[in-house]
């Protein structure tokens, strides 16, 4: 009987080794090991009819046959898999005539592009780019710029106040800076004249948005301090900047304004790119024909004194404006909010 089982296993192993593909292999498995009519199951059932003395030897022979058949199946399965892989690899060919897949290269956000252009142009005029904190002390954002608590100018610069993590000292309130002007003070505190810096950066205002206003936006600030600077230096620098950033065509309006930290102060506006002053309902300029782009002026003597500069010896000028407005003026983008909606159809145009 045990001899029969050995012959059976020999036959099964040979059959399995000859299986040409997965289907043949599966058929062989079912034929020999199949639970219902498998040859080995039939043999196993016969154990019951054997005399007790023969049972152990027969059982061992069944197990041995089963082990050999399973081994043969596993071996053949692996061999079939290996030759399938080899066949596939053998058929693969690089098609060197295919056009390459297009690589989609990213680009800088239009506001980053504009910021870099601003820095580059001011660098050509001798200004170094520096950056400063977006979360600022009340002192730098207001006090040091001649805007003490209760000053009506604070109304114009409402912001988000932040509870002071350094012990909640209410006499040292923190805020999202409403402009980049606080960096004028920080730079003057850290350096000695002559100073020529431009400071781009993010600002915050508690304000409803519209086509030209956002509550989080970017400004650039400029500061020049030296011994013989005048208003004509200010005007010359800003006109040179405007011509470089917009080309020659954009009209510039320079007129008197008020800021607590400059005296005298002025405002720069550009003629409206959307309507060129022709549409009284224009969404961009509100029918004014002009878009305010920057404030500027001669640094107030009290501001100079506060950082320990002698106003009799040093004067300087400062300016600050919105970066999105420049990007809008240059590109004709009709709404500031487009810059922050992350819509590639818009952003890819830059
Ligand atoms: N910081 C002002 C604002 O946000 C703009 C400004 C006005 C900046 C006059 C200046 C300046 O440097 O001299 O409205």
Image: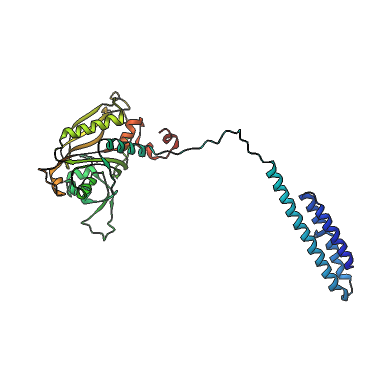
* Residue 233 position (above or below residue 249): below
Q: Is residue 294 visible?
A: yes
Residue furthest to the top in view is 278
Give how far across and how far down residue 211 sits, in percent: 33, 35
Ligand 1's quadrant is top left
Q: Judge left or right: residue 64 versus residue 254.
A: right
Residue at (30, 29) in percent of width and height = 246
Identify the image quadrant of residue 10. bottom right
Give how far across and how far down residue 191 sits, in percent: 20, 48
> In the rendered image, which quarter contains the N terminus?
bottom right
Identify the image quadrant of residue 237. top left
Q: Is residue 285 visible?
A: no
Residue at (81, 54) in percent of width and height = 17
Q: Nearer the viewer, residue 139 or 82?
A: 82
Residue at (32, 41) in percent of width and height = 217
> In the rendered image, which quarter contains the C terminus?
top left
| Number of numbered callouts drawn | 0
Give how far across and how far down residue 281 sits, in percent: 30, 27
Q: Nearer the viewer, residue 319 or 244?
A: 244
Give how far across and how far down residue 82 sits, in percent: 71, 51
Q: Judge left or right: residue 30 versus residue 220.
A: right
């Amino acid at each position: 009987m045990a001899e029969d089982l050995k012959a059976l296993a020999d036959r099964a192993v040979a059959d399995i080794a000859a299986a040409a593909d997965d289907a043949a292999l599966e058929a062989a498995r079912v034929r020999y090991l199949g639970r219902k009519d498998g040859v080995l199951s039939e043999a196993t059932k016969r154990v019951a009819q054997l005399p007790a003395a023969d049972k152990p030897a027969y059982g061992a022979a069944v197990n041995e046959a089963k082990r050999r058949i399973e081994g043969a199946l596993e071996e053949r399965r692996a061999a079939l898999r290996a030759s399938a892989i080899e066949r596939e690899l053998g058929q693969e060919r690089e098609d060197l005539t295919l056009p390459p897949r297009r690589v989609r290269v990213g680009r800088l956000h239009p506001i980053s592009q504009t910021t870099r252009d601003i820095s580059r142009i001011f660098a050509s005029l001798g200004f170094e780019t520096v950056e400063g904190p977006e979360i600022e002390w009340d002192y730098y954002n207001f006090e040091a710029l001649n805007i003490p608590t209760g000053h009506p100018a604070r109304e114009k610069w409402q912001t988000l106040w932040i509870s002071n993590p350094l012990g909640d000292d209410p006499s040292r309130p923190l805020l999202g800076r409403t402009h980049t002007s606080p960096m004028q003070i920080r730079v003057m505190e850290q350096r000695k004249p002559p100073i020529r810096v431009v400071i781009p950066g993010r600002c915050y205002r508690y304000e409803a948005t519209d086509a030209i206003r956002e509550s989080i936006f970017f400004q650039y600030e400029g500061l020049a301090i030296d011994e013989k600077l005048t208003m004509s230096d200010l005007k010359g620098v800003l006109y040179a900047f405007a011509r470089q950033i917009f080309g020659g065509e954009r009209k510039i309006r320079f007129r008197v304004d008020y800021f607590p930290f400059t005296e005298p102060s002025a405002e720069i506006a550009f003629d409206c790119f959307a309507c060129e002053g022709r549409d009284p309902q224009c969404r961009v300029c509100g029918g004014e024909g002009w878009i305010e782009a920057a404030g500027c002026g001669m640094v107030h003597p009290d501001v100079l004194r506060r950082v320990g500069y002698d106003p009799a010896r040093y004067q300087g000028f400062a300016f600050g404006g919105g970066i999105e407005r420049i990007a809008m003026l240059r590109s004709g983008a009709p709404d500031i909010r487009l810059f922050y909606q992350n819509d590639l159809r818009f952003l890819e145009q830059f």
